[in-house]
Image (cartoon, rainbow, N blue to C red):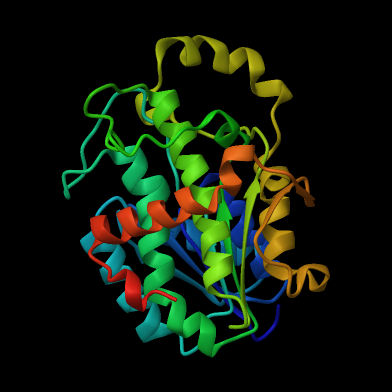
Amino acid sequence: MAGRTVLVTGASGGIGKATAVGLARLGARVGITGRDTARAEAAAADIRAASNNAAVDAFAADLSSQAEVRRVASEVLGRYPRLDVLVNNVGGFWAHRHVTADGLEHTFALNHLAPFLLTNLLLDRLKASAPARVITVSSGAHTAGRLDFDDLQGEQKYSGQRAYNASKLANVMFTYELARRLQGSGVTANVLHPGVVRTSFGAEDQAAFFTILSPLIRPFLKTTAQGAATSIYLASSPQVEGVTGQYFADGKPKQSSKSSYDTGVARRLWKVSADLVGLSTGTQN
């Protein structure tokens, strides 16, 4: 990865930070995003030390806010003349419904709309750097996901698990539609399930039964390094050069849910997402 530049979102801890360490160890210049400036800077320092690579940059942004996504995209474009890999890792789980600065349901905004908008804002730079890669972290939970276009914001009925599952299905469908739109551009798009990993994921707003269950199941969960392995593989391996529009788990291509392959729904999701973030669908190719 020497000479290549990578951006990993949501990398001040957990899988994202482990992904950044792995790619920095391979010689890449790595940018990370984190919601809190001090925590992002501290994570960047940790990554430099763990990888013995000084080329690690921190960008602070709350990606649930579209203004913040646009600002950090502008900063990344100003800092990096080329961008070889974008790892859309940021995500979260909230047991209760929260609303973002844009008036959108938090889970859908952070887990889906943030990577959708950031990817589109960085797309020209990725194309100019081709061959380039877009990797999005989804979850096996997408198989239980359902996109209700009449209630995408969970205003009528909200469940943390339902919102999470739907956002992870959106990640998969976004990736497949992006891969179709990028055919022939030299930019590939793939999506992955990292496994069930031992992190503080969802700790901000957990359902009570998760709080009870967590200590019992933690010993059986993957480490963050194990959870990051597929992201690192997809970002760096020559074996997946040119591979696009695939869902991976444990470093291997797998079938995603049947509903995730519905191209009509994927196109509708793209249009709705573009409208929600203020992008023109006609120019996003």
Q: Is residue 31 left or right of residue 50?
A: left
Residue shown at the point (35%, 78%) measured from the top left:
283
Q: Is residue 48 left or right of residue 160?
A: right
Q: Position of residue 238 (x, y in %)?
A: 80, 74
Q: Quadrant of the C terminus?
A: bottom left
Q: Is residue 158 left or right of residue 208?
A: left
Residue shown at the point (38%, 25%) measured from the top left:
160
Residue 194 falls in which quadrant of the image? top right
* 189 vs 167: above or below: below
* 147 vs 285: above or below: above
- Residue 12 shows in the view: no
Depth order, front residue of 163/14:
163
Task: Name the residue furthest right.
Answer: 239
Q: Position of residue 175 (x, y in %)?
A: 55, 58
Q: How many marks?
A: 0
Depth order, front residue of 150/94:
150
Residue shown at the point (68%, 37%) measured from the top left:
195
Q: Position of residue 176 (x, y in %)?
A: 57, 58
Residue shown at the point (62%, 32%) measured from the top left:
198
